Amino acid sequence: MSKPLSDHDRKKQISVRGLAGVENVTELKQNFNRHLHFTLVKDRNVATRRDYYFALAHTVRDHLIGRWIRTQQHYYEKDPKRVYYISLEFYMGRTLQNTMVNLALENACDEAMYQLGLDMEELEEMEEDAGLGNGGLGRLAACFLDSMASLGLSAYGYGIRYEFGIFNQKIINGWQVEEADDWLRYGNPWEKARPEYMRPVHFYGRTEHHPDGVKWVDTQVVLALPYDTPVPGYRNNYVNTMRLWSAKAPCEFNLKDFNVGGYIQAVLDRNLAENISRVLYPNDNFFEGKELRLKQEYFVVSATLQDIIRRFKVSKFGSREIARTDFSKLPDKVAIQLNDTHPAMAIPELMRVLVDEEKLAWDMAWDVCVRTCAYTNHTVLPEALERWPVDLFAHLLPRHLEIVYEINRRHLERVAAKYPGDGERLRRMSLIEEGGQKRINMAHLCIVGSHAVNGVAQIHSDILKATVFKDFYEMEPHKFQNKTNGITPRRWLVMCNPGLAEVIAEKIGEDFIRDLDQLKGLRKFVNDEAFIRDVAKVKQENKMKFAVHLEEHYKVKINPNSMFDVQVKRIHEYKRQLLNCLHIITYYNRIKKEPSKQWTPRTVMIGGKAAPGYHTAKMIIRLITAIGEVINNDPIVGDRLKVIFLENYRVTLAEKVIPASDLSEQISTAGTEASGTGNMKFMLNGALTIGTMDGANVEMAEEAGEENFFIFGMRVDDVDALDRKGYNAQEYYDRLPELKQAIDQISGGHFSPKQPDLFKEIVNMLMHHDRFKVFADYEDYIKCQEKVNALYKNPKEWTKKVIYNIAGCGKFSSDRTITQYAREIWGMEPTLERLAAPDDKQ
């Protein structure tokens, strides 16, 4: 295909990228050169591509600073209610392009770089991902920050500035190998250290009970040093703050107990304190009860609450003294959202501050605490629920243990009053789990200490009320809500798929970017030949571009006319990458059996990281790579089926693969995936979904129309019925010859001829203890995939379904999600007004 326009000229025509005015471009070039010389202080001939990236980043950052200062000044003067989103993870990805999109600078910067003989895309590739998250939960927090700023909410994201984020994944001889993610190696141009707001955080020690209250004494102190990152709203001149805490040892650390010659060791031991913010725990949907992790959780909570209370107390605009001492007003000015139970310590810590330090009576403090805090639940998997050993708590946070016991005592009194004589219910609802070693159930603490509890998709919220938190729902039904997740259309459409954004804008204008419900307007073009052609053309271009990327980075040649069948997400048994594998093997066997038939060509791509300690997940990766080695080198198959494991899946790779995908695999066992958000990204970017009725898939099918969705498999009720009856894998193995053949090939070494027993344990798991019932959905999955193949052979009908899907995406904007949180949980009202830009004369 010959391109009439160069890539650069094509981009200039994409209006959603902003206008490239002459003055704008000239000014950007001047600023860029100023930064380049200032940064380098030597001649431009020795500048590296990284130097150019930093110069561009600082040039773009200059456009944020004035807006940032003005936004914070605006909040200070207006004194609105503020929301604090506390999360142990913020999976931000890259910042440069997203900032240009939200500030409408993309075309101007592109033109400025072009005139300077530089390629902006090459510079963008120099930026490291901020990989401070594992998957869905951390990426959701990042989308929420974008939406909160775009809706003009006075919001703050609080978390930890991990020195090492999620590990980089290398595939070596088919196995996952982890390497440290040293993302700060070259510095981070987007953050600003704020040492003036450093806060002390206490650990260990003991409590003393006096007539005038309780003192927590003999503690060890670690300092929390904040780093602020600007979060720009979409073209509204709001810039909010993400504040991440880094751990620092105090100057006197270990020196007061110096021994002769102990000075050097004392300085070296500072590392122990600073290890708190060293590394992100790489587990997704799994609880690892380590002391360092509990330290991280309390560290972020303690530092953040000090910041919240300082900000609450400071005077209103124009007055010098502390304006507020009446803590009964805290819930009118502060909302705290707990992203899962990881920041659950906020509840006992807020109680400690209010009761021990601010001297409020318990009942008053508790009322303030409950009205301030709200809790989002992200999973029903039992192995993911946080249950901290009481003895670890007693050692690390003795005062908080006393407070949790007191919360529990009063809570159980209320339960007993409502359900007299029901000892079994008391046991189930206690915050403390007895038996074996005593543990604190953090989800129970969050429910009791919050005024709102939400799930993240309708089906998930219903499951919470019916099962996991049934007793709590019966007692306080008013607390339970649903807030279906969403994604930001700025990063996940305008930024990563400008071609599609432009084709949409030509039909319905650009306002859909702030109000995604307007995508409904595409339904009337579903039979418009030109529109169908344009949507299909953008997809084909994205596929070509990704095919080139794969060839450059993975040395694999793929057929860009094949169906790109993609499953990218963390590797986990409940996500059932193994079911995908069984389809791949079945399709392979069918091609081998009838090689002359007209098969729909597919390139199957699977990507995702396995937690380093999750042996089964690592074996699943090895199986995928092994299947690929055999199929990709089989001449009979040719390019009708290719299997590729996408190495080091992360935000930046998602932004490349999702716009190029035809088929999205969302195949978890019904009732296990709380929501999913990758599913929404594929739908918005013109892929069709094959999926179970799980998580947000249910609502996606409802919005797009079930006839435009490939739904298969058991529903939640079927899974429950099968559990009652007893799931017997052998029965499916005996009844379905193609399933038997596939399993026999895996276990007989067909995909591992040099190590025939390599996958014995996977087969053993599938046959004898598969909690997620892969075989039970196999037959329906294969039939459903046959329907996918048939439709793909009819590109026009396929693309019509794509258009219905895109048109149904409005609900899945994080703007809608955040608007609901604001109105229904935080008691705040979003605004679509713009702030004046710093250069506006006002």
Image (cartoon, grey):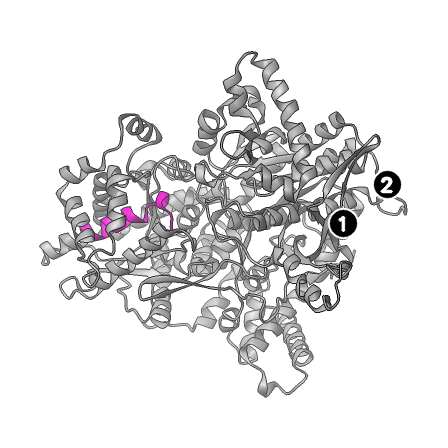
705 inside magenta stretch:
no
The residue pinned by badge 2 equals 323
Q: Secondary structure at mark 2?
A: loop
x then y, percent, for residue 584: 23, 52
Task: Kindly report the distance in space between the C-alpha atoms of the residues bearing marks 2 and 1.
Answer: 18 Å
Q: Residue at x 56, y 50 (%)?
A: 89
Residue extending farthest front: 260
Q: Is residue 713 left or right of residue 435?
A: left
**What amino acid is found at the position of numbered circle 1 in the picture?**
His
Farthest residue to the right: give it: 320
Q: Is residue 338 visible?
A: no
**Magenta part of the chain:** 570-586
Q: Residue furthest top?
A: 420
User: Which of the 4 image quarters holds residue 225?
Assistant: bottom right
Question: In x, y percent, where is residue 412?
Answer: 61, 21
Whether residue 429 is visible here, answered yes or no, is yes
The first of marks 2 and 1 along the sequence is: 1
Residue at screen point 46% across, 55% down: 501
Tag 2: amino acid: Ala
Left or right: where does residue 484 sit relative to residue 417? left
Tell me where residue 30 sits by quadrant.
bottom right
Tell me residue 174's x, y (percent). Answer: 31, 63
In front: mark 2 or mark 1?
Answer: 2
Residue under label 1, please give it.
74
> In which quadrant of the rendered image does the N terminus lie?
bottom left
Eyeballing the image, is 769 above or below 762? above
Q: Is residue 28 above or below residue 822?
A: below
